[in-house]
Image: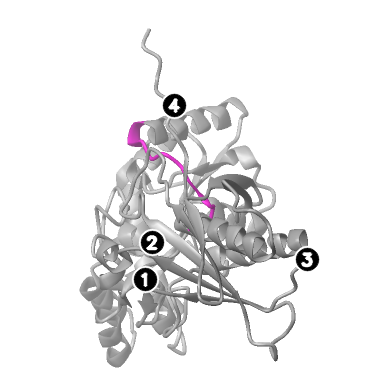
Amino acid sequence: MTRKKTLRTGFTTGSAAAAGAKAATLVLGGHAIPSDVDIPLPDGERMHVPIQGCRSGENGIKCTVIKDGGDDPDATHLAGITAAVETGPGERNKGEIDICGGSGVGLVTRPGLPVPVGQAAINPAPREQIRRAVNEALLITGLSGPLQVTISVADGEKIAGRTFNPRLGITGGISILGTRGTVRPYSHQAYRDTITACLDAATAQNISRVALCTGGRSERFLRSMHPELPEAACILVADFLSFSLQEASRRNFARISYACFFGKLVKAALGYPYTHAKKCSIDFTALSSWCQKAGLEQIRSQEIKACNTARQTLDIIRTDPDPQPVIRAVAARALATIQGFVGRTRGIDLVVFDDQGELVIEL
C-alpha cells in the first residue's frame, strides 16, 4: 500500500514579519542573534520561525525571515521579509509600538479593505501579532520602548504583480496577511476528503442540522448566534460550495445552513460552484444591476460598478435608508443557486455576516 505524503505546513507573511520583529527587538535589547524565535499566532497557538539573519541599521536592528509557504506555495513563497526595529521619539508613550510599512509593502489607495486608505497594507490580525511578538521580546530584554517597527519585503512590488493587489488598489508592494498565522497545505482532494469525513461524523452523532461554514470566523459568528449548534455540526468548507452542499444533501440532513460573508454570497448568486478568488471574480456590473432592480438608488448602483471588493459594495448598500430589500434580493439569488446545486428547496438556508460579525441576513 502506498503511504500518502504528509503535506508540510508553512507560515504567513504576518508570521514572518512578527518573527523578524521579535528577533530584532531581542538583539536591540542586547541578546545574541537567534537562529529562530517562538512567536504567538493569531489563533492562540505558537510557532518557531527560523531567522535568516540580522544586521545593524541606522538607528536600530534589522532581521530578515524567508517566508515559507510549506507545501502550498503562493506568490510570496521564499520572499525575504525584514523587520527593522528602532527606538522611537522620546516624547511618545513609553510602551508604544508603531508599526509601519517600508519598501515592498503595499499602500492602500481604495476603500473596501480592512486597512484604511493611506495606510500600509498590514492587515489587523498580523499587525496585532507583530505587536504581541515585540511585547514578548520587551519583557525578555527589559526594554520599554517606544519602538518603531518597519516591515519591508525584498522585490515586494514585483511580487505584488502576481497577486490581486493591483486590482484592489494596493500599490507598491504586497500585503502582510494571515488570520491564522500558518499556511495549511491546500490539496483539493484532501480538503474534499476532510469535508466528507466531517459530514460522516455528524451523521454518526445523529446531528440533524449541519452548518457549512466558509471558515473559522463564519463558524464562530454562527455559533455565537446559535449556541445550540454543536461543534461537530459546523463543517469548514472553504470554497467548495457545490461539493459540500451535494455531499450534505446525500446524507439527508434535515437542515443545511450555509454560513458566509457577503463576498461568498455574491459569488453564489452569480452561480459559481467553487468560490476561490483564483477561479472566479465578482461581476460588479451584474451586482449593480440587481441592486438597482431591487430599489437601490441609481447613484449608489453606479458606485457599485466601480467597486473593488464585496465589502465595499455592502457598505454602499447600507447607506440606503432601507438596505434590507436590496440585500434580500441578492441573497434570494444566492439561495436559488444553492438550492439548484442540491435539487431541493426545503431545509436549505443562508446566514450571512459582515466582517465584524454582524448579521447581514438570514434567509
Per the image, label 2 sits on a secondary structure element best described as helix
Q: Quadrant of residue 207?
A: top right
Location of mark 4 (residue): 6
Q: Earlier in the sequence, mark 4 or mark 1?
A: 4
- The amino acid at mark 1 is Ala
Query: Which label number is shown at residue 265?
Result: 2
The answer to whether mark 1 and mark 2 are in CB contact below 8 A is yes
Q: Residues within 10 Å of mark 1 (few under 14, many from 20)?
A: many
Q: Earlier in the sequence, mark 1 or mark 2?
A: 2
- The amino acid at mark 4 is Thr
Q: Quadrant of residue 118?
A: bottom left
The mark closer to the camera, 3 or 4, is 3
The answer to whether mark 4 and mark 1 are in CB contact below 8 A is no
Q: Earlier in the sequence, mark 2 or mark 4?
A: 4
Location of mark 3 (residue): 142
Per the image, label 4 sits on a secondary structure element best described as loop
- The amino acid at mark 3 is Gly
- The amino acid at mark 2 is Leu
Location of mark 1 (residue): 310
- At x 58%, y 62%, the residue is 24
The mark closer to the camera, 2 or 3, is 3
Q: How far is the residue under mark 1 from the one under mark 2?
A: 9 Å
Q: How far is the residue under mark 3 from the one under mark 4?
A: 41 Å
Q: Earlier in the sequence, mark 2 or mark 3?
A: 3
